[in-house]
Image (tube, rainbow, N blue to C red):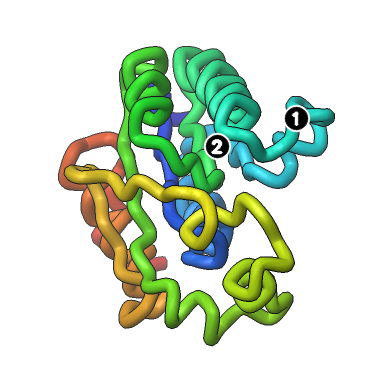
Amino acid sequence: MSDHKGFCLWFTGLSGSGKSTLSRMLEPELRKRGCKVEILDGDEVRENLSKGLGFSKEDRDTNIRRIGYVAKLLSRNGVIVMTAAISPYADVRGQCRTMIGDFVEVYTECSIEELTNRDVKGLYAKAISGEIKNFTGISDPYEAPESPEIRVYSENQSPEESLAAILEYLESQSLIPGTATTSA
């Protein structure tokens, strides 16, 4: 059982930039260190907590505020909460930072060109051609964080390299226990 306090690791970045992948990779690493962990994935929250919301700015903001509220409840009870939602607007991310308090922003940076190349569902191509409306980064804005606590470059960093950078930051800030120095 960890005596570390809870906090929120807020992943933001465009669709396909690695938010969910990194949070899923980080979860077992944190559990091995005795941490309580929950992931609030944007798609799952939208299905279960924000059903009926569309993709207007107002609906997106409502969805992100709901994620922030749940993250606040969990983190104040000693859970490390990871959010993996695009959260495109800086203002609402800032509101969540204020509401939650213990907040670490992780920006998964990747170019539209690379995201289009790796997009197996073809969503970027459809958004670029106008088939999909209100697509973040194409026909809807994405306001990149100006000074995130952690920035990973998923275009030219492997997921393992990004994971190592995140763990290194969290250890350096004493937010998580370090790994044991002796091997079993």
- Whether the residues at callouts 1 and 2 have beta carbons within 8 Å, the answer is no
Vertical placement of residue 24 versus 98, above or below: below
Nearer to the camera, 172 or 14? 14
User: Which quarter of the rendered picture does the C terminus lie within?
Assistant: bottom left
Q: Earlier in the sequence, mark 1 or mark 2?
A: 2
Q: Check disc 2 and report the residue beneath it.
A: 37
Seen at 42% across and 31% down, the residue is: 8
Specify the amino acid type for callout 2: Val
Q: CA distance from mark 1 to mark 2?
A: 27 Å
Expressed as whole percent of the image width and height from the top left, the position of residue 107 reads 34, 52
Nearer to the camera, 35 or 183? 35
Can you see residue 25? no
Report which quarter residue 112 is drawn in: bottom left
Specify the amino acid type for callout 1: Leu
Q: What mark, if any, has residue 53 been given in the picture?
A: 1
Q: Secondary structure at mark 2?
A: strand
Expressed as whole percent of the image width and height from the top left, the position of residue 26 reads 48, 55
Left or right of 173: which side holds 69?
right
